[in-house]
Amino acid sequence: MYAVINQLHFNKPVDELGVAVRNEGMPLLASLPGFRDFYFIKVSDDRGVVIILWEDAASAESGAKAFGPTWFAKNFAPYLASDQQRTGGAVIVQYDAG
């Protein structure tokens, strides 16, 4: 499994952006090959963290090419107050308490 973590600073309330993610972003992400899970975490009123889990690095790369220039560019990028901090890597330990 591969995780992509994106720390975002917005000039718009995170709660408002969450609605667009839920209604429009999730159906697109869920349709992409290798997609596993998605979390949008509110850190403060204007800061959020996105965690996306993929089957592997190749799926993450393909997903970024499909999601970044389309949905992200239209719905998140115009509201960024500073550069995003994006990292990714192989998940080496996973535990599901469910």
Image (tube, rainbow, N blue to C red):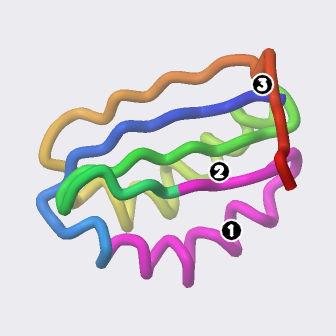
Query: Which dot marks residue 93?
Result: none
Q: Earlier in the sequence, mark 3 or mark 2?
A: 3
**Mark 2 secondary-structure assignment:** helix
Above or below, 38 relative to 30: above
> In the rendered structure, does residue 30 fall within the stretch colored magenta?
yes
Residue shown at the point (51%, 59%) measured from the top left: 70
Q: How far apart are marks 3 and 2 (CA)?
A: 14 Å
- Dot 3 falls on a residue whose secondary structure is helix
Marks counted in the figure total 3
Amino acid of disc 3: Ala
How crowded pointer 1 is (Cα within 10 Å; few <14, some 14-19, many 20+) is rated as some
Q: Where is residue 3 in the image (x, y as percent from the top left)?
A: 67, 31
Disc 2 and disc 1 in contact, CB within 8 angstroms: yes
The three-letter code of the residue at mark 1 reads Leu
Crowd class of label 3 (few under 14; some 14 to 19; many from 20; radius 10 Å) = some
Looking at the rendered structure, the kind of residue marked 2 is Ala
User: Is residue 61 rendered to the left or right of residue 88?
Assistant: right
**Residue hosting label 1:** 28
Q: Looking at the image, is 1 positioned above or below residue 71?
A: above
Q: How far apart are marks 1 and 3 (CA)?
A: 19 Å
Judging from the image, what secondary structure is the residue with disc 1 in? helix
Q: In which quarter of the image is the N terminus?
A: top right
Residue at the spot 49% in from the left edge and 47% down from the top edge? 50
Q: Quadrant of the C terminus?
A: bottom right
**Residue 37: x, y in percent?**
74, 53
Residue indicated by mark 2: 66
Viewer-nearest of labels 2 and 1?
Answer: 1
Over which residues does the magenta segment extend? Answer: 17-39
Mark number for residue 57? 3
